[in-house]
Image (cartoon, rainbow, N blue to C red):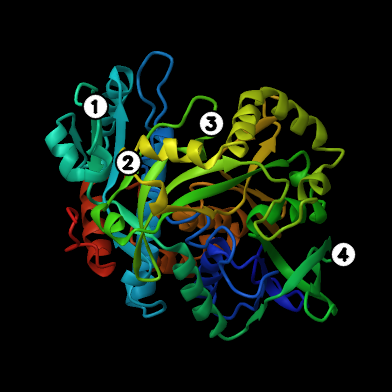
Amino acid sequence: MDLNEKTPVGSDVILIGAGIMSATLGLLLKELQPNLKITIVERLDVAAAESSDAWNNAGTGHSAFCELNYTPMRADGSIDISKAVKIAESFEISKQYWSHLITSKIIKVPSSFINRIPHISFVWGEENVDYLWKRYEALQDCHLFKGMEYSEHPEDLQVWMPLTMEGRDKFQKYAATRMSLGTDVNFGALTRCMFNCLQQMDEVTSLFNHDVKGLKRNKDGSWRVKIKNRQTGDKTKLNAKFVFIGAGGGSLRLLEKSDIPEGKGYGGFPVSGQWLKCTNPDVIERHYAKVYGKASVGSPPMSVPHLDTRMINGKKALLFGPYAGFSTKFLKKGSYFDLIKSIQPDNIIPMIAAGLDNIPLTKYLINQVRQSPEDRFEALREYFPNAKMEDWELEVAGQRVQVIKRDKENIGVLEFGTEVISSADGSLAALLGASPGASTAVSIMLNLINKCFPENIKSPQWQSKLKELIPSYAQPLDKDAQLLKNIRSMTSEVLGLETATVNH
């Protein structure tokens, strides 16, 4: 659609959901076209209270440095690095935009949301060590991973991750890779900073504590959004040229309410999560890395175990997990009827087909739900052999809703990623799925803008502004080593990542 069209509506843009995606899209659009009227609708009383919150799902700063599920082994034994390259480049784009927000004094000092913390992949056993070496060699072909270290020497691994190596069998074979350039991102803090900025801009209205009850297209192509105040019960109708549904796990139900043909056949599979959170300050202080391993056979990719240093509200924290589970809720603060209500005549067959194809996953989730505290602790001890149960407590994470859809080969397939669904005229778009969403939010929203506002984005004004916001815009970082070096130098300086100590 064209945002310059003269349509008599209340807002140019309605953003549903106050998470990292809506914050990113809202700020991008306001910088590209400052006179836009934007209305934000959020069902809770604060921004970033669901998936964007640091204690829920977001926080790692996914850059494909250590996440082994992004580099699968092909049937011939070679390693496919294509997804890792795409994610690593997307994270560099995010860092550029965040740097712009800081230099423009839009958000607070970088240490409030981003810190340098090494990313480590750790494996044991002959077969896994062989895989990690092949992965390391394959990644050396791409300069996005320049600086990655590989070692099988216990002395190196002891320095990189002392908690993980202490108390291990000396006769076992171990290997790890380390990227000291890794980061930790508090997306809750970042999102709230971005919304604080948005709310101070002209022609921006925020409606917290409001539920979206209906979405209907008007005769002129605009949208009517029915909302309800959760405190007073008052109902209101809003009109807008463009609607973005960025409500995390709640997006699927809202997409169904819109009734756009492009949204037909989509279903959702909710996966809940839990962390073990360390409560011993001495243990927390001794670990300074994100140590990722390999997912268990049959487990979903987002359940890759990791011993994870995070900075949350200025304090160092240590988490282990996640432990997967099953809940019929689509949001952490949602309803147990979410899954049932999402089943429609057009998606029931894809959902059944995906379920039949993923019986091992279902069994895995059932076993995870049935885990005792001792079972969870045994999983922790694979990454921290000397752990003591009294030093850890259980923390409930956020809900994720994985995409179920038809494709060319399957009646129904379960997707582990993010996907933007938009109407043919570009007047409505919804984001479904999960990881690595937050870390790649800027790239996802740039693709959405390109898809939904093709005429606007071609204009010299928007092109010029995008190059200002993201210096590498329209230039592939994976093809230009010097450009990447320049960009990383700039973002590291602005984000305060240059002089960080990696051997903490």
Sequence-wise first label, 4 or 1: 1
Judge from the rendering whether residue 146 lies leftward or rightward of residue 440; answer left or right.
left
Residue 271 drawn at (x, y percent)? 62, 43
Amino acid type, residue under disc 4 in the picture: Lys
As helix, strand or loop, the secondary structure at mark 4 comes to loop
Sequence-wise first label, 3 or 2: 3
Judging by the rendered image, the residue that carries numbered circle 2 is 384
Sequence-wise first label, 1 or 3: 1
Amino acid type, residue under disc 3 in the picture: Ser
Q: Are marks 2 and 4 in contact (CB under 8 Å)?
A: no
Amino acid type, residue under disc 1 in the picture: Asp
Amino acid type, residue under disc 2 in the picture: Phe
Q: Are marks 3 and 2 in contact (CB under 8 Å)?
A: no
Residue 296 drawn at (x, y percent)? 47, 28
Q: Is residue 150 depicted above or below 276 in this figure?
A: above
Judging by the rendered image, the residue that carries numbered circle 1 is 169
Alpha carbons under labels 2 and 4: distance apart: 61 Å
Judging by the rendered image, the residue that carries numbered circle 3 is 299
Judge from the rendering whether residue 256 lies leftward or rightward of residue 269; answer left or right.
right
Judging by the rendered image, the residue that carries numbered circle 4 is 219
Q: Please identify, in this view, whether the residue under mark 1 or under mark 3 is nearer the observer.
A: 1
